[in-house]
Amino acid sequence: QVQLVESGGGLVQTGGSLRLSCAASGFFFDLYALAWFRQAPGKERELVAHLNNRETIYAHSVQGRFTASRDKVKRAMFLQMTSLKPEDTAMYYCARYVRGNYYHPAAFDLWGQGTQVTVSS
């Protein structure tokens, strides 16, 4: 089964930390760039972090606070979030890149179901 499954979301206070996981299956994990996106109610889906073979690109709003990584053995991607703010509240998705501008969701052909992150205060 070709899929991405996110986990690790939850409710946290301002300044707290969370670690999100994205488990991949059914495809050649090492051959694809991956990304984290997020979407708040009434907002456009936005890129959080994009991981390719050269570098990891972060949104300005999370740079210095979030760290994305991937584990080839576990076939998983992670997002370590620290110093969380209420504006980080959103549904977080992992996605598989296929072609095009990686800032746009249309460049990704496979998505997880999402995991909710809510930051209070």
Image: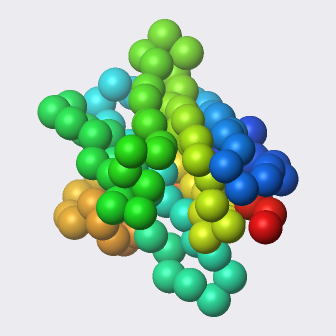
Question: Seen from this angle, which residue lies furthest left?
Answer: 54
Left or right: 52, with 80 as reference point: left
Q: Say which residue appears at 49% left-offset and 59% top-offset.
A: 37
Rendered location of residue 9, percent (x, y) = 75, 47
Q: 117 and 98: which one is in front?
A: 117
The structure's colour scheme is rainbow
Residue 2 is drawn in which quadrant? top right
- Side (left or right) of 74 relative to 50: right
- In this rendering, would 106 be left or right of 23? left
- Give me the residue at 79% from left, 53% from top: 13
Camera sees residue 5: no
Q: Could you say which quadrant of the image residue 29 lies in? A: top left
Where's residue 39, x and y in %?
A: 58, 71
Residue drawn at x 50%, y 74% is: 45
Identified at 51% across, 32% down, the residue is 77
Q: Quadrant of residue 91?
A: bottom right
Image check: 76 left or right of 15?
Answer: left
- Where residue 40 sits: x, y (%)? 63, 75
Residue at the extreme right of the image, as rendered: 11
Q: Is any atom of residue 105 visible in this view?
A: yes
Residue furthest to the bottom: 42
Q: Residue 88, relative to residue 20: is it above or below? A: below
Q: Nearer the viewer, residue 50 or 120?
A: 120
Which quadrant would the C terminus be assigned to in this image? bottom right
Residue 115 location (% of width, % of height): 72, 53
